[in-house]
Image (cartoon, grey):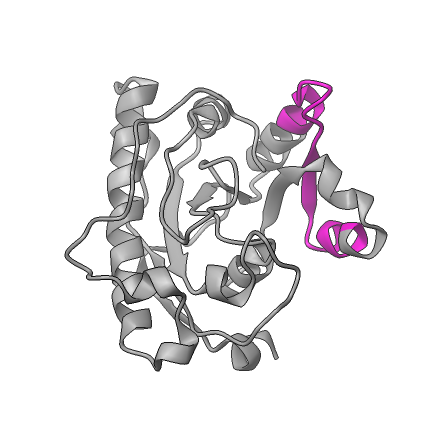
Amino acid sequence: MMILYFRIRVHGLRHYPDEDGFLICSNHQSHLDPVILGVACPRPINTIGRKTLTRVKWFGKFLYWLDLIAIDREGGGLEGLKETLKRLKRGESVLIFPEGTRTTDGQLQPLKLGFATIARRAKVPILPVAFDGGFDAMSRSSWLIRPANIQVVFGPPINQADYHDLSDDELAGLLSERLTSCFLQARKMCKMQPRSCRSPTAASDLRKDPIVRPPSNDWQNH
């Protein structure tokens, strides 16, 4: 149903690890992102999100149905971090949005470093994935859900051995490079679709790189 309504297309599944127990890092375009990526991933996943999202009763129930790990920002987020590590260590996979908040223009945003803390403590691979079209389906300023062409691209995983000797900033730079590559592929495929299926920013020249600013500190996500 979701695939038909949003025309979700998934690419790069060859990069999806055969065994669970890894951290999925994605760009963040809308409230629909956990649903979009839940459909795109071939196996069940957990999703990290801020606890305030559950204040809307029906939406909160829906998020918990999607195995939400609620982060209480006001309380420091420690319980959410513990639960995330617990699930990763018992072999489950967890989705995090390292940008920390939804985009305001459909572009990529700077990464916060909290994902690095989680990956190092859990000693798990990092799987980059980026998509385009979610902003067109439901922008940050709207609760209106519209049909859209959504292209999801998985990139090569970053294994523990690949980041063991990197600083958090260097790891963020590596993840940013892979997310940018995936995002440009997704945007290119969205651009090939009818104009009504794309956000205004998706129609921009693909030769212009998406905005990727220096990483910042903050592990909590929006």
Residue 78 among those drawn in magenta: yes
Q: Quadrant of the C terminus?
A: top right
Q: Is residue 83 left or right of residue 2?
A: right
How far across and down, in percent of the image, does residue 121 sit? 49, 21
Q: Which residues are magenta?
A: 60-82
Outermost residue toward the right in this view: 57
Res. 112 image quadrant: top left
Q: Is residue 201 left or right of residue 58?
A: left
At x 47%, y 78%, the residue is 7
At x 52%, y 39%, the residue is 101
Q: Residue 155, relative to residue 55: is it above or below?
A: below
How far across and down, in percent of the image, does residue 39 sit? 54, 65
From the viewer's side, name the closer residue of 172 and 30: 30
Q: Is residue 24 left or right of residue 94?
A: left
At x 34%, y 60%, the residue is 201
Q: Is residue 71 left or right of residue 207?
A: right
Q: Residue 14, relative to residue 101: is it above or below?
A: below
Q: Quadrant of the N terminus?
A: bottom right
At x 39%, y 32%, the residue is 111
How far across and down, in percent of the image, does residue 134 sit? 48, 61
Residue 209 among those drawn in magenta: no
Q: Residue 201, relative to residue 164: is it above or below?
A: below
How far across and down, in percent of the image, does residue 172 sit? 32, 29
Q: Is residue 139 visible?
A: yes
Q: Residue 78, relative to residue 157: is it above or below?
A: above
Q: Is residue 12 visible?
A: no
Q: How many marks?
A: 0
